[in-house]
Image (cartoon, rainbow, N blue to C red):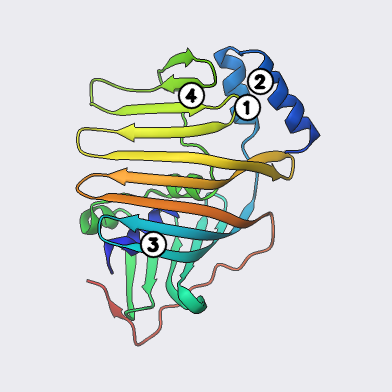
């Protein structure tokens, strides 16, 4: 299985009240406590999450377009399916907090094992909570950590950078008090996640477009447009490894 499929998995691995809140945010700059409270209160609450996405992937060597479907049982199961041109399914996976099954349907191969083993095999570590938060567009922000807070003309920024371990993390919140950009980097790697196209999802506001960019030895870009999102539906998370499939390793 190539790194493209793994990257796909890992990354995939507004009503009246919202308008009033946006107007208030634009007319008056708020202190950090109110900004944090607004962000935390706007997290979507769900037992199950279902989404269909149109996705574009590009790297230094290639460009691909495909569709992805996600089904999540909160904190328990992540199910994913990736289809290429003409609706041909090329990848299916299920992720549990401690294990993962990946079906490479294009090559008739499978991987089943501990999720930690992906770090050894592919030099990535897609822990369950990070995958769940990325797919459901929940910003990767821990306000219990030490940070520096700044305000400029249009944005609020939280700088979580830690000089001791060379980790740089900058979170930008837009004037409507929605996450705009998260940038994380160390000496070898860079990751940015941009949130766009905020629209109503029930009583919350949800970003229907995210753009992920990574840089290490290669540059990888992933644009995800959410076509359909449903919460708290009854979902099936089944997956079976065909007898004819052979192990990836």
Residue 88, above or below 101: below
Which residue occupies the foreground of this view, 91 or 128? 91
Do callouts 2 and 3 mark residues in contact (Cβ within 8 Å)?
A: no
- Is 39 left, or right, of 111 in this rendering? right
Visible residue check, residue 13:
no
Do callouts 1 and 3 mark residues in contact (Cβ within 8 Å)?
A: no
- Earlier-in-chain disc, 4 versus 1: 4
Do callouts 2 and 1 mark residues in contact (Cβ within 8 Å)?
A: yes
Q: Residues within 10 Å of mark 4 (few under 14, many from 20)?
A: few
Q: Which residue is mark 3?
A: 100
Q: Using the numbered discs, state the Cα–Cα distance from disc 4 to disc 3 in whole angstroms.
A: 29 Å
Which residue occupies the foreground of this view, 163 or 246? 163
Q: Which residue is mark 4?
A: 143
Mark 2, mark 3: which one is toward the viewer? 2
Q: Residue furthest bottom?
A: 244
Q: Residues within 10 Å of mark 1 (few under 14, many from 20)?
A: some
Q: Secondary structure at mark 4?
A: loop
| Residue 135 on image: x %, y % | 50, 50
């Amino acid at each position: 299985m190539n790194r493209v499929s793994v990257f796909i998995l890992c990354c995939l691995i507004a009503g009246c009240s919202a308008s009033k809140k946006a107007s208030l945010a634009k007319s008056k700059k708020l202190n950090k406590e109110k900004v944090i409270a607004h962000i935390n209160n706007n997290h979507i609450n769900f037992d199950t999450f279902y989404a269909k996405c149109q996705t574009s992937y590009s790297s230094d060597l290639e460009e691909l377009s495909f569709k992805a479907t996600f089904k999540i049982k909160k904190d328990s199961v992540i199910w994913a399916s990736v289809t290429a041109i003409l609706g041909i399914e090329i990848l299916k996976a299920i992720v549990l907090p401690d294990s993962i099954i990946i079906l490479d349907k294009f090559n008739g191969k499978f991987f089943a094992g501990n999720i930690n083993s992906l770090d050894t095999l592919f030099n990535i570590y897609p822990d369950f909570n990070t995958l769940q938060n990325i797919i459901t567009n929940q910003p990767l922000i821990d306000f219990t950590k030490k940070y520096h807070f700044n305000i400029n003309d249009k944005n609020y920024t939280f700088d979580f950078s830690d000089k001791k371990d060379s980790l740089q993390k900058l979170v930008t919140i837009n004037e409507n008090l929605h996450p705009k950009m998260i940038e994380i980097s160390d000496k070898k790697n860079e990751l940015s996640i941009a949130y766009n196209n905020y629209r109503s999802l029930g009583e919350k506001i949800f970003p229907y477009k995210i753009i992920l960019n990574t840089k290490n030895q290669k540059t990888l870009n992933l644009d995800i447009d959410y076509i359909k999102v449903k919460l708290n539906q009854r979902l099936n998370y089944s997956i079976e490894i065909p007898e004819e499939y052979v192990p990836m390793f």
